[in-house]
Image (tube, helix red, strand yellow):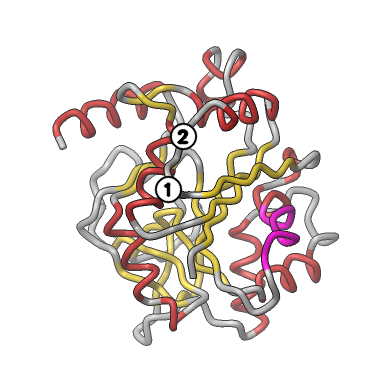
Amino acid sequence: MTKAVIIAAGRGERLLPLTRISPKPLIHVNGKPLIEHVFNTLRKSGIKECIVITGYMEHAFRKYLNNSKFGKMRIRCCYNPSYTRGNATSLKTAQRFLMEGEKFLLTMADHITSEEITKTALKNAAHAPLLCIDRQIRDSPQVNEATKVLVGEDGYIRNIGKEIPLWNALDTGVFLFTYKIFEVINLIKTKYSILTLTHCVKEMIKMGFPLWACDVSGNFWMDVDTAEDVALAERVLRSA
């Protein structure tokens, strides 16, 4: 398995006014566009092809990708005209680039992660579908904004969401999915006006498609949403 899907479609409203002139994944963090950190991590992890789902300011992505070099890693740009209807609708846009039965890595263009996280996910592909989770972070400023996860004693996810009352891990934003995820999206896409990956995961669990919790505790990851997050990411990356 050598393919990854990167969701890069959102408006990044919490980073206004910067995102009035640039989509969030192209905002520079430590001297590079945010999404370039994602590309570098995936390339070092052995990914050969990335499918980038764009939405807001799609033309800026195409210009950036046309003028950038990523070694031997192939980059495909795929536009989601319905990007305001949730990140699961953006994932659905990538379906035509994937074959039935194919497994693929999914990550977000605004998440910076260590390559150990993606490598661990890939090493555990036999457990797919899976979500990389962190059991250790409890006092980070990002905890309030993070998606929480409840993992059962058997290692499978029981619940997920930002507001769930009981949780024992955090969602790092790195998934390894099977083609089954598209079946779930198609089954529930009319149920929600805004369809998120969290909705899909919850529905998968209800349908009896277990999602394994891939423990990557102790490895660096962060979601870059605000100006404060950008400053924190720059401090961390400079000290790495």
Alpha-carbon neighbours of circle 1 within 10 Å: few (<14), some, or many (≥20)?
A: some
Residue 54 location (% of width, % of height): 66, 38
Separation of marks 1 and 2 at Cα, in angstroms:
32 Å
Range of residues picked out in magenta: 91-98
Residue 40, above or below 13: below
145 or 232, which is in the foreground?
232
Q: Nearer the viewer, mark 1 or mark 2?
A: 2
Circle on res. 146: 1
The prevailing secondary structure element of the residues shown in magenta is helix
Q: Does 215 appear above or below 197?
A: below
Give the amino acid type for the residue marked by disc 1 in the picture: Ala
Image mark count: 2
Residue at the spot 60% in from the left edge and 82% down from the top edge: 209
Report the residue that reaches farthest toward the front.
72
Query: Callout 2: 10 Å neighbours few (<14), some, many (20+)?
Result: few
Q: Secondary structure at mark 2?
A: loop
